[in-house]
Structures are given as C-alpha cells and as structure tokens.
Amino acid sequence: MRRSLLLTAAAAISMVLLAMLVPMAILVRSYALEDRLARAALEVQAVETVVSRHDDKGSVAVYVDRLNDGEEHTQVTVLYPDGTGVGPDPGEDSRVLDARNTGRARVDDVADGSQILVPVSRGGNSALPSQTPVIRVVVDEPGIDSVVGVAWGLLALLALALLAGSLVVVDRLGRSFVQPIRRLAEHTQTLGRPGEPDPVAAVEGPAEVQELGAAIDRLVGRIQLLLSRERESVADLSHRLRTPVTALRLRVEAVPDPDLRERLSGDLDSLQATVDEVVREARRSEREGLDPRTDGVHVLAERVRHWVPLAEDLGRPLELDLATSGPLLRTSRADLEAVVDVLLDNVFTHTADDDAVRVTLTATDEDVTLVVEDAGPGLPAGVDAAARGTSGAGSTGLGLSIAARTATDSGGWLATDTSDMGGARVAVRLGTA
C-alpha cells in the first residue's frame, strides 16, 4: 500500500511538474531569443549610422568584419542595390527586395533563428529604392550550449528537488496510514494460534483506522463467545450421550440371540466412534489453533517407530525407509499421529501376522509423503475405502476417511493402489505450512 501511494504520488507530481516546467522552459528559450534580437537591434542602429555616412564599401566592410568577429551568435551583412554585399551572407531574396522597395524594416524566422532586415536611406525621403542598401542581421536561436541550457538545468534540478520533497511528505503521510494497518494485520495473524488473543493495542492514525481496530476487537470478542458456547454444547452432548449409550450397551448384552447381540454391539461401537469424532473435531480449534504448523517428518517417523515393538512381538516383517528431515506441515501433531495409527492399525487388523509391511516416508521442500504397503489380501474390489463410513471389512469406515481429510486439509491427498508386495498400498501426501 505504501509503495502504491508513492508510485501514485510520483506519477501525479510528475505530471504537475511537467505541466509547469515545460512552458517555463519554452518561455526561457523565447526570452533568450528576444534578448539576442534586442542586442541585434542595437547593432543595426550602429551599422545604419556607418552605412548612411560612408559611401566607401571598404570602410563599411572593415566595420562589419570587426562587428561580426565580436559576436558569436549574430552575423551582420550589408546588401547594396547593385547586388554586392558586405558581410558573411551576401545575396538577396524576396524579403530583402520587399524591405528595400517598401522602406520598412522587418523581422522574419529563418532556419535555426531569426533575421532582421533594415533598409538604410542615404538620400532623405526622395531616395529611390534602387539607391537603398539593406542591413541583414541573422540571429541564431539559443541552444543547450547557451544560457538556455543553464536555465533548463536549473529547472530540472528544481523539479527533482520538488519531486523528492513531495515524495518524502507523501511517504510520511503514508506511514501514518500503513503502520497502524500493519499492526492490525500482525494482530489478526495471531488470532488462529492457541490461547486467548491479546486485544488490539491503542491504534494511532486516522479515525477510520482506529474504528477498524475497535471493530476487530468487537469481532474477536464475539467469535470467542460463539466458540465458547459451541464447546460447552459439545461437552454437554458428549456427557448427555454417555449415559444413554451405556444403558443401551447393558441392554444389548442382555439380548439372548448372539447374532443380534453382535450386530447391535457393532452399531453401538459405530455410534460411539462417531460421537467421539464429532467431539474431537469440534474441539480442534481450541486444541490446535486455526493455523497449525508441525515438524511432520519428526512426528511421523516417531509414530511409525511406536509400532515397531508390536510388529516384533507378532513376528511380522516390518521394513522402514524414513526421511530424517523435512518442511513444516500445515496440520497438527495429533492428526499426524492419527494418520499413522489409522494406516498401520488397518494393516495389523486386516492382514495375517506373518504378512510383511513396508513404510516409506519421503520429504521435499513442497510436501511430505507417507506410503504404507503390505503383503496381505489387498483392499476389497469395488469399494472406495477412503470414503466416509465405507468399509469392506466390517469396521466403522472412519479410519481412512479421517486420514484423507487430514491430507486434504493440509493441501495434499490420499491415494490407494495395489502394492508390488501383493497387498494394499496407501499413500498420503501432506502439504507444507
């Protein structure tokens, strides 16, 4: 925002400066040319006196040569009626003939400057045009190497100074807007972390920014109140359901039909697992915050090794290939541990004790991938094992769906396939924080 303000101000100020300084530069050049023309007029008067008093062209030539040698940007030439000329620019054109015939001086624009034509009458009012010499003074237009260049340089320095000073003022004004907003942004980034957020400190700056800070405080308070009520409702739900479920379980155990009792017990287990997951998900924001960041490789590898003693007790071959370091993941430690438990529990529960298991953990700068393979019978055909509530082995069907949601929430995915070991292959990709 601050940079945008500076760029906008620089563009606007530059346009204003150009609108002011370009006409000033043109006026400076015009004034310089007018000054040269004024000095040339004085020279014309002097040459006119010499020409009117001397009929000898040699004397006039000496004076004109001396005058031209002393002036760098002005050249004087005397054009006589007989076609001869004294000076560096002999030769007549229609403008010279007009000045001689009319007896009026004139100023004309020529290439790279201006010229002054002044007829000189040497015989009074009765002099004929054929007896009138004409003085031509060519004045060069001022260029960069003249005082015009110095003036333009000063104007450019003035423009730069005004632009720099204006940008400093705009930057100071921009900071008065940006700094309070930046502090508010830093505060809002802490709202997703565990614990109670601190209130916004007294905001200094424009009234609108202060109102924004107060509105954020009110919004945070309202959200905390709603979350607190939601947690209380979830806690009440868990407590209220515990007693009816226990009573149902006691009644189920009293059912004489063993098949019906087993089915009812399975339904109660599914209900209990569903309630536990609802309570766990409702308390996620309180437990983990809204933006968890976890050293995923460390947590996953540690949880995989937690299952090694069980595999050794069962005599199950377990092959591990675990990365040692990786990026932070956008998920919590509890969810990562749950992913490992779900995948390995499925293997240990639904395969034989002597079926081999292979766990591979790889990490890059963008993601971490956990792959669990086994030599068991594989996943049931035609069943989406990652779908919620779907199971091909009589379980609740929540395990892989929980792992899939964890992967998706982190920006990754879960995929199932057939392993080269003959059984199932489940790959979970987890996105970085």
Image (cartoon, helix red, strand yellow):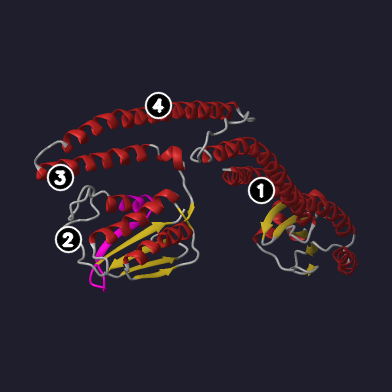
Identify the secondary structure beneath mark 1.
Answer: helix
3D distance between C-alphas at marks 3 and 1? 95 Å
Q: Are marks 1 and 2 in contact (CB under 8 Å)?
A: no
Image position, residue 157 (x, y; %): 75, 51
Name the residue beneath numbered marker 4: 229
- Which of labels 1 and 4 is toward the front? 4
Out of 207 and 47, give the one closest to the viewer.
Answer: 207
Image position, residue 166 (x, y; %): 69, 41
Q: Quadrant of residue 269?
A: top left
**Residue at horizontal 37%, vertical 49%?**
409
Q: Amino acid at mark 4?
A: Arg
Identify the secondary structure beneath mark 3.
Answer: helix
Out of 286 and 49, give the one closest to the viewer.
Answer: 286
Q: Earlier in the sequence, mark 1 or mark 2?
A: 1
Which residue range is magenta in the image?
404-423
Q: Is residue 38 left or right of residue 332?
A: right
